[in-house]
Image (cartoon, rainbow, N blue to C red):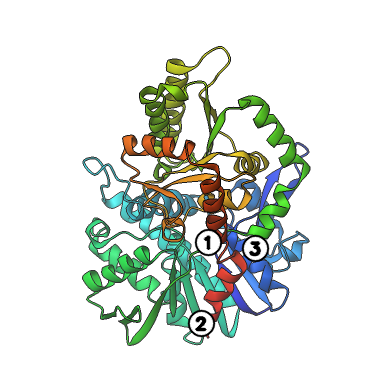
Amino acid sequence: MDKAQILVASNRGPVSFSIGDDGAVKSRRGGGGLVSGLSSVATEIETLWVCAALSDADRKAAAAAPEGRLDKAGYDVGGASVRMLNIPADVFNNAYNSVANSTLWFVHHMLYDTPNKPSFGSRFRAEWEDYRAYNSAFAEALLTGADEGAKVAVQDYHLALVPKMLRVCRPDLRIAHFSHTPWAPPEYFRMLPADIGRELLEGMLGADHLGFLSVRWADAFLRCCEVFLRAPVNWGTRTVEHGGRVIRVGVHGLGADAQGLRERAAAEDVARWRERLRERVGDRKLIVRVDRTELSKNIVRGLEAFGELLRKRPEWRNRVTHLAFAYPSRSGVAEYRAYTESVRATAEAINAEFGTDDWTPVVLEVNDDYPRSLASYQIADVLLVNPIRDGMNLVAKEGPVLSLNGVALVLSTEAGAADDLGADAILVNPYDVSETAEALHRALTMDEEERRQRTERLAEAAAALPPQRWFTDQLRALD
């Protein structure tokens, strides 16, 4: 197998597959910061991306490709070599749904209903074995594909054990791990079984450089190292000593791809959506949110705040519409299915209380339509981003970049984006529905010139670390 100088490991790869009506496998290129960042280096240096097959169609494509190499099977993967791992479905399900998404995600986002969950018994231990096996499959693929002294960029909580697995076998490799989520403080992280908490921390400390989206998340990780590993931490340099090595911890606040967003938003399908949305809401003010129906996004409290705005400030009735675009997320997890229904019920209740023959207060769409999202950013008067806890939240950054007439950003203090955008956003406690309702009122009544100036500063801050630079900065940290 060809050896690469740069390797990326992530659960989701740069291409996904579906099976058409004719039974043929069809591919689709993905988006996002990692895809953009990798594309910028893949044409210049031998690069291998290792990812997992996420669906039956992915598995079919991976099985048909030589050694899972999608580039050798003729698929458009953006210039890099891509190896898709066909991990057994039951192992993948336990690692991805049961451990990564139903345990680690809940811990780092502090989402547990603790009187009832979690409960770590023998079933969880079996699921953890599969999480370990899943990480091991990635490590083996990276070891096989890595050239001498190669740089390896491991992504996210799905693959927290990979750095140590690589370090044990190949001390020559330069390894980075990046966390796209928050990191739990010790007070919450300690709910994990002690041995598993240590295994996670030690797994990540196999890296040379650990990256986080916010200073808060980096500091929480370092505190966990102090508390649970008793590892010496140098807070001045953000380094931690472990296993006879010094590991650096960096903050890389991923920004919006302003140029790419503006080019995509100039397309005809976005213009058509812009016209449709404007026809639907008329000359009313427009509050927009774009989210996955995911527990940490706090959609229900955001809707409740809009309802309270209409209740306490009746002057806004029939003068403002809330467009809530919430596309389905993690339907394999029961809590997410229930939350999606709660979002629907809350929107329906507001419309039943305040709606008229010619005005629907909340326009809720539970499906994914990227051109529609871009169009809504362009015409929003207010952008509501109120997560309970979020590693970054690129919606908060993309909205101001695409705004045509200025947008007031109502932003949770618990989003990583608040670090970069807090000076010009209206910050809210995500649990305080009344404060959020008042913030919406303040945003709707903001002077047009103030809103325009804030939007300019927000857009500049949002694009300060575009995906290409975000990715290359982490590679440079390994030099």
Q: Is residue 347 left or right of residue 87?
A: left
Q: Position of residue 232 (x, y in %)?
A: 25, 81
Query: Closest to the observer: 277 or 284?
Result: 284
- Alpha-carbon neighbours of circle 2 within 10 Å: few (<14), some, or many (≥20)? some
User: Pointers 2 and 1 in contact (CB under 8 A)?
Assistant: no
* Residue that numbered label 1 is attached to: 461
* Residue that numbered label 2 is attached to: 478
Q: Position of residue 391 (x, y in %)?
A: 43, 57
Describe the element under mark 3 as helix, strand or loop. Answer: helix
Write down the quadrant of residue 23 in the picture: top right
* Residue type (three-letter) at the residue carrying disc 2: Leu
* Residue that appears at 53% across and 86% down: 479
* Residue type (three-letter) at the residue carrying disc 1: Ala
Along the polypeptide, which appears first: circle 2 or circle 1?
1
For discs 1 and 3, the disc positioned in front in the rendered view: 1
Along the polypeptide, which appears first: circle 3 or circle 2?
3
User: Pointers 1 and 3 in contact (CB under 8 A)?
Assistant: no
Q: How far apart, in angstroms, are the residues tagged by discs 3 and 2? A: 20 Å
Write down the quadrant of residue 359 in the picture: top right
Q: Position of residue 124 (x, y in %)?
A: 32, 52
Q: Is residue 147 left or right of residue 120?
A: right
Q: How far apart, in angstroms, are the residues tagged by discs 1 and 3? A: 19 Å
* Residue that numbered label 3 is attached to: 36
Describe the element under mark 2 as helix, strand or loop. Answer: loop
